[in-house]
Amino acid sequence: MNIPEIKLADGKMIPRIGLGLWKNTDPESFSLAFKAAIKVGYRHFDTAQAYGNEQLLGQSIKSSGIDRKNFFITTKIAVQNFGVKKSRNSFNESLRRLDTDYVDLLLLHFPIPVLRNKTWKVAEEIKAQGLARSIGVSNYTINHLKQLEQYATELPAVNQIEMHVFLQQTELSSYCKGKNIVIEAYSPLAHAKDMDNKTINNLAKKYRKSYAQIMLRWAYQQEVVVLPKSVNPQRIEENADIFDFALSDDDMRLIQAENRDLHTCWNPELIP
Ligand SMILES: NC(=O)c1ccc[n+]([C@@H]2O[C@H](COP(=O)([O-])OP(=O)(O)OC[C@H]3O[C@@H](n4cnc5c(N)ncnc54)[C@H](OP(=O)(O)O)[C@@H]3O)[C@@H](O)[C@H]2O)c1
């Protein structure tokens, strides 16, 4: 499968589907998932210091026989590693665990107050040194982005946020578009909880696609990067098989009506 890419504000390309790696820490199932993913064409992998699997990703890439430059690796600075010294040191540790000289995308994982400002400046330095090709943030609301604009030399290329049919994030999306910040949709399946929405089920029948594929295609048609997680080889393939159909404008409108502003992870709007 050929996974389309999108250009970031800094000129770098990013694959529109990435494999989410949260909670994938068992070496055997990690390896199985990674192999299944690269077999069907995934090259973009979304890890984080907090996920505890950077080392597994580094090893898997090394033993894949595929050149490092063909992969797109994202990692994120964990909240407990924010601050000047800690973020720099923890990033060096990430590089060591990933067994690489650079990451494609470095994100600040969460907008914790005060320290996020200094940590962003460290991310800018890391980028200037070529150790991260692109930098961005995660879980930033419009409020957090507006604050960042006051002290940043460079705006984030990416904002990774929870986004799915039930949390459509229209206001934040249009704000990011206006600033040329690409959104990455995390938890695009809303954790696959209660996959029983009537509209999605009807569309799955209509397009002869699975429930998950309708959810992922909706996200894809928002012009965002989509990050589904699975450890199951069949689902990994299914989740990338969304390029042979398109939801019509009318069907996109039907899905629009399913928004419930439902956060299934956390709500960063509570952070000042
Ligand atoms: N920046 C952040 O704060 C943040 C927060 C959350 C997530 N993320 C990123 O986004 C990624 C995805 O989000 P997520 O893991 O929270 O949730 P998700 O991708 O919405 O859902 C994952 C769940 O869906 C199941 N699943 C996957 N494909 C399926 C399919 N085709 N049919 C039915 N069930 C399916 C998975 O089970 P199986 O594995 O058994 O298939 C798993 O239980 C994470 O792994 C992480 O990389 C980032």
Image: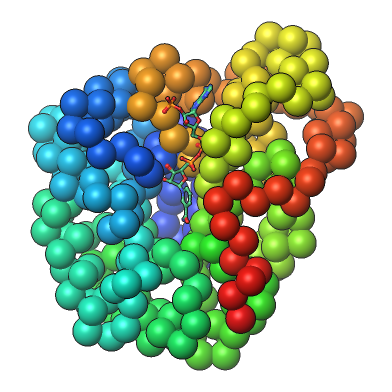
Q: Is residue 138 visible?
A: yes
Q: Residue at x 33, y 66 (%)?
A: 77
Q: Which quarter of the figure has residue 210?
A: top right
Q: Residue at x 61, y 23 (%)?
A: 213
User: In the rendering, at what x and y percent does residue 28 appear?
Assistant: 19, 26
Q: Residue at x 79, y 46 (%)?
A: 260
Q: Is residue 236 above or below residue 269?
A: above
User: In the rendering, at what x and y percent does residue 252 appear?
Assistant: 81, 33
Describe residue 65's horizontal placement relative to residue 130 as left or right: left
Q: Which image quarter is the C terminus in?
A: bottom right
User: In the rendering, at what x and y percent does residue 243 appear?
Assistant: 58, 24
In the current view of this chain or complex, which residue is farthest to the bottom? 151
Q: Residue at x 32, y 72 (%)?
A: 80
Q: Is residue 127 above or below residue 59?
A: below
User: In the rendering, at what x and y percent does residue 268 appear?
Assistant: 59, 66
Q: Is residue 105 above or below residue 92?
A: above
Along the viewing direction, whichever of 89 and 245 lies nearer the viewer: 89
Q: Is residue 249 visible?
A: no
Along the viewing direction, whichever of 254 and 12 lies nearer the viewer: 254
Q: Which quarter of the figure has residue 95?
A: bottom left
Q: Which image quarter is the N terminus in?
A: top left
Q: Is residue 240 above or below residue 58?
A: above
Along the viewing direction, whichever of 52 and 183 lies nearer the viewer: 52
